[in-house]
Image: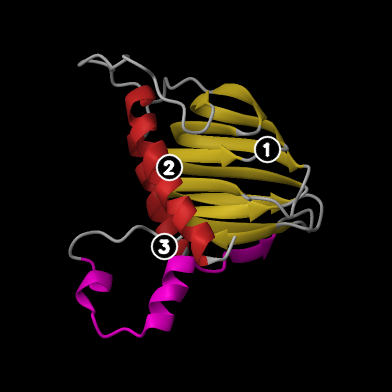
Amino acid sequence: MKKTLLLLVALAALAVPAAAVAKTIEVKGPQAVAGRGFVRGELKMAKTDARPVALRFRAGYVRLIDLDDDLQVRCLKRPAQRGDAEQKDGERKDGEKKAERQGSKPRESKNAKGQTVLTCIGGALARGSHFQLSGFSMRFVILAPEGTTGSITGNVVTREPGEKKKGDAPAADDDSESGDADADESDAVAEIQSALAAQGK
């Protein structure tokens, strides 16, 4: 995983313009926050037994710090791509395939303050009373369920989950995150719903 993180950091240096301006968005779920590049934030969940905060980080990673000793994290499985060994291997057992759909455990470590740090490549489902997040992604979507509050800082846009811009198509020369965010949110919702269904939630 260390090699993967180093590769992502190197990619970040090349992919994110130095002039990119970060902004802070106040979160009050249900709410979706989408964007690209580096992102950081701090969230609180009123109910940790409800739906988790879903973080989809395409071609990126997310790191979560437990601030209240109750954070539960499950890494999301990277979507299979055409030609992947996963698609070619038709001899895997059903149990193994189900385990892959459910994702995997995050990498766990401790920071200088002794706090638990959980890292996932590609995204995560997180439940916890109070936690910080940071990461990088070419495109990311964070879905905060009802009862979630806090703030997220980065090159981001926000909307209610599932909200569509009626009759509003991005201009041909518009390279902002708004057009990509809609497509990414749809992908994230589909994958997150699949992951939740696989976990029986």
Badge 3 marks a residue whose secondary structure is helix
Q: Please tell me which residue is depicted at 34% across the width and 57% down the height of the picture.
A: 79
* Residue placed under numbered mark 3 in the picture: 3
Q: Kindly identify the amino acid type of the residue bearing the numbered disc 1.
A: Glu
Give me the disc on residue 154: none
Around disc 2, counting alpha carbons within 10 Å, would you say few (fewer than 14), some (14 to 19), or many (20 or more)? many
Q: Kindly identify the amino acid type of the residue bearing the numbered disc 2.
A: Ser
Front disc: 3 or 1: 1
Compared to 133, does 199 lie above or below? below
- C-beta proximity under 8 Å, tags 3 and 1: no
* Residue placed under numbered mark 1 in the picture: 146
Around disc 1, counting alpha carbons within 10 Å, would you say few (fewer than 14), some (14 to 19), or many (20 or more)? some
* Residue placed under numbered mark 2 in the picture: 137
Front disc: 3 or 2: 2
Along the viewing direction, whichever of 201 and 174 lies nearer the viewer: 201
Compared to 168, does 127 lie above or below? below
| Residue 142, percent from left and from top | 53, 39
| Residue 127, percent from left and from top | 68, 53
Q: Quadrant of the C terminus?
A: bottom right
Query: On the image, which quarter does residue 13 sit in?
Result: top left
**92 in magenta:** yes
- Part of the protein shown in magenta: 84-110
